[in-house]
Amino acid sequence: MFCFFCDFFGYSLIMTVTMFVLCFFWSIPVSIQLLGPTNRSNGYAWSNMDYGNTEMSTEGLLSKKCYHILLVTFCFRGHFNPASGVARALSKRSHKVTVIVTDQCSDLVEKYMPEVTDYHIRPVVPNINLPSDPFEAMKRFDEFNRLNNTIKMFEMLDHFINSSGSQFDLIYGNAVSSGIVLAGRKHNIPVVSQVVGPLMPTAAKYPSLLHSTDLPMENTEEQPSLWSVVRNAIYISIYEAAVSYKVFNALQDFHAAEGWEQIPYGFGRFPFSYVQKYSLLISHGAPPLTRAEDHFYRNAVSIGFIPDDIMYPPLSEELSDWLEKADGPVVFISLGTVIALTQEESETMFSQLVSQKRFFFIWAVTTPMLQSLNISKTLFLSRHLIVGRYLPQGNILRHSKVKLFVTHCGANSVQDAVYEVKPMVTYPGFGDQPLTSNLLNSKKVAKLLKTFTYKDMEPLLNEQLKEPNYSQMIARLSVMKREQIKQGGFSKAVTVIEDYIENRTVLNRSDNFDNVIGFPLGQMMFICSTTAVFSADNAL
């Protein structure tokens, strides 16, 4: 692992100390090119035009052709749900959609993509349960991103495309999967990659490490503590060593084997910066939360979020009756399908929610959590608590008696909260969830929950429900909802896909890489220095 340091700056102790000082006390506003120019077109229509920050009207631009789209999606609901919405919209516009999923969610295809009859089960990118601690979660990301999402994903798609006998006009993939982009490039098929959650900062706009953190903050208006800054730098360095650099090496080996251009490591975040260069990004959600207002992201377009009836199934009779009988504020809790609470956390929260009398709670949990709580039925009901698996989140939030949403800040959950205008209490897990939590906090529509106990949650719920605070949050969320709807939703995604296939949309391949997801020079020096120390310690 010590050679990792050689690839960046060599063994010079003087250089390491210098880089540490440069980055830690000021940020050098210099951006480095992430990926060098290439003359390989791979069947795409390239130009220096920018795409992403323009208003787009779908009126009069609907394609008259029917295309064959290969859609590859994960089973994580945060990724599957928006992909299924795009599939439904494509089918509605008479395009043929072929879907690839793992066997863990084959039943979801029939439920959420009823018009898709051509779907295939492949054992790639299995669901994983990640601990809520970001450092522990990072340890499992190498296998997920490098092995599954890059190497195995490419091998699977390469074999599928070669053996299918079909001519695909476009691949709809995911921004975390560089293997999908590799397969598209090899087979000269354009790729659209969906982004759920906020787009990460670009090199030109990345804030100083001393003034920002990707870890959750209670008060985003204050400067992060020194300990938070150090933890954030360590977190980034672990990502660089354990994920980004290993994905880069896998991509570099593949490029060499195919005779393609070399990929300088640069100062990007792999796989995201690679996917951003070689595919068109479709961003789901409200732009105030998915892309910073002063950022320009090349090769990216927002489609917002507008749910349909399939995405928002009706409430069961049991849920409806329980809600009607609730004579106090109802709070919905959902931490998604990936974060795994400990047995003690689950049992403690369950006993506290059952015994309290102040609020009415609906708690959506996973099957393993139901089992850990010794709940044999799919739905547990008491006077002040419902616990169930895969509850209809959208229509629960839509109910007038539901006042607050305790969320892990997953992309789907935030979209639903914005669409149904429900203030939040955030308990973020890993990845972009702490960033989303900080964004919601800064927009004054949410408060951070530090520990998952009712003792800590109750004062936050009371604070959020106080007037005029609650009405002010409703007003702010209403503005976000209008912006989210204005983007066009899933039908806009179809128009974007059609435009891309028909060369009405072109990717930006200019040599200006300021707008690529990554880091400025000064901060990357510090991050790489920290990474070198981390890698050397692990090698010993």
Image (cartoon, rainbow, N blue to C red):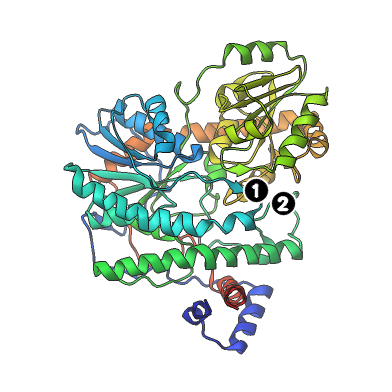
Decide which of 413, 485 is in the foreground and name it: 413
Question: Helix or strand or loop: what does disc 1 sit on?
Answer: loop
Whichever of callouts 1 and 2 sits on the residue coming sooner in the sequence is 1
Q: Quadrant of residue 489?
A: top left
Q: Is residue 14 above or below residue 215?
A: below
Would residue 18 appear left or right of 141 to someone viewing this image? right
Q: Is residue 23 above or below residue 168?
A: below
Q: Quadrant of residue 388?
A: top right
Q: Nearer the viewer, mark 1 or mark 2?
A: 1
Q: Quadrant of residue 358?
A: top right
Would residue 463 appear left or right of 264 to someone viewing this image? right
Residue holding disc 1: 132
Q: CA distance from mark 1 to mark 2?
A: 15 Å
Quadrant the C terminus occupies: bottom right
Amino acid type, residue under disc 2 in the picture: Met
Residue 14's x, y, as percent?
62, 89
Q: Residues within 10 Å of mark 2 (few under 14, many from 20)?
A: many
Residue 405's x, y, as percent?
67, 31
Residue holding disc 2: 217
